Image (cartoon, rainbow, N blue to C red):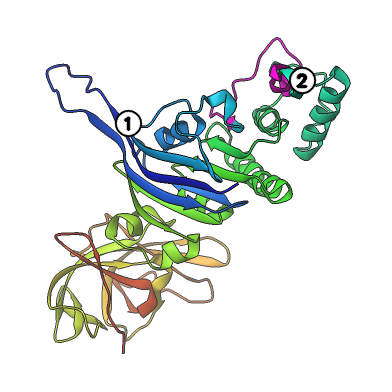
Amino acid sequence: MKVVLQNVTKKFPNRNKRIKEEVIAVNKFNVEIPDGKLIGLLGPSGCGKSTALNLLSGLLKPTEGRIFFGEDDVTNLPAENRGVGLVFQNYALYPHLTVLQNIMFPLQNFKGDKKLTKEVMKEKAYEAAKLVQIDTLMDRKPSELSGGQQQRVAIARALVKMPRILLLDEPLSNLDARLRLQTREEIRRIQRETKITTIFVTHDQEEAMSISDLIIVMKDGSIHQIGAPQEVYDNPVDGFVAKFLGTPPINMFRGRVEAGKLWIGDEAVLSVTGAPEGPVAAGIRPEGFVLDEKGPLSCKLAEIEVMGRDVTVVSTHEESENVEIRSIISAENKVDLAAEKVRFSLKPNKVLLFDVTTDARIYFNAN
């Protein structure tokens, strides 16, 4: 099911009654979500991503704009008539019902021609449970399940009525690290098997990038960038997107462009032909550093973190905006721990420049 939002805006009254100006939670949201794709709606807390999800579900009505499911205008359609499956952060399971009864519950609300027999409802519930691999737990109550199992019940309950679109609101935030990894892989598998258009809201960029076909990066209610995860990571449109994506985060430096060179402090670290002269914010991805005794960028060595196949060199620089510079290099490289400084050359495709005033991306040619 293709989903289209046209100029969707949501405003709320200001909590401070003395201020008449409304709070804009979602601002002129324009996006077309392709049929059968998994979309990561990504941004920091308070950016409007959950509000956007509630607008899609019908729990909120937009102040302006239109919402389409396929060719159907659902802007004013009640939530119960939209054919949406919704999974919340807190699972919202009925504690007095068994897993089977929880999954069957949405089917019991079908009326008229859509009303199902108990046998058919049970059959559909078991099909959904098998999809999320909990069909052996159908007689248990939620209190007898782990957090990951409860999450699977919530997903099965959303899938059992075969919704037109599936909406997931921070579905993994209550799970521990290992379960988060396992469950997000399961969500991806389920989405591929069902081919239901799925929108996954999260503030965790690693989650969004690992399972999404497309990510939508939001800030202050507005879309900053839409694209395939790797494309957005490699080619962010502005400093906000560059800083938000990546673990460890991008290393930011105060720099300047002079005579076609990027200068950080008193060192010319890279050729940046075509970039306008003047001060810039220079971002270097952690994997963009190459250990090089004759490299143009020198940093003060702090410590080495051995991570198995990789080594993280932790250093500092007076022009760094980060407290620490984190450079990921191969474990095959040998770092002299007794050295006061460490020198790097840079991978041009991992160096990003931004306007210090507008935060917009500055493009250049590396020679």
Estimate how packed mark 2 is, as few (under 14), some (14 to 19) or many (20 or more) residues with alpha carbons within 10 Å. few
Q: Residue at x 56, y 56 (%)?
A: 213
Q: Quadrant of residue 111?
A: top right
Q: Image quarter for residue 144?
A: top right
Determine if the magenta segment contains residue 326: no
Q: Furthest residue to the bottom? A: 367
* Residue shown at 70% from the left, 45% from the top: 190
User: Which residue, as the protein is rendered here, is positioned at the far top?
Assistant: 96
- For residue 8, the mark is none
**For residue 5, side relative to residue 106 (left or right):** left
Would residue 98 be counted in the magenta stretch?
A: yes
**Would residue 41 be visible to someone looking at this image?**
yes
The residue shown at (82%, 34%) is 127
Q: Secondary structure at mark 2?
A: loop
The circle on residue 115 is 2
Determine which residue is flagged by label 1.
Answer: 63
Residue sitting nearer the eye, 242 or 226: 226
In depth, the one of 202 and 148 nearer the eye is 202
Give left or right: position of 218 versus 273.
right
- Callout 1 amino acid: Thr
Residue segment shown in magenta: 86-110
Q: Is residue 76 left or right of residue 144?
A: left
Where residue 95 appears, x then y in whole percent?
A: 67, 13
Residue 175 picture location, percent across and down? 58, 34
* Residue kind at label 2, given as amino acid type: Lys
- Mark 2 vs mark 1, CA separation in Å: 34 Å
Disc 1 is placed on an element classified as loop
Q: Nearer the viewer, residue 357 or 116?
A: 116
Picture quadrant where residue 17 is located: top left
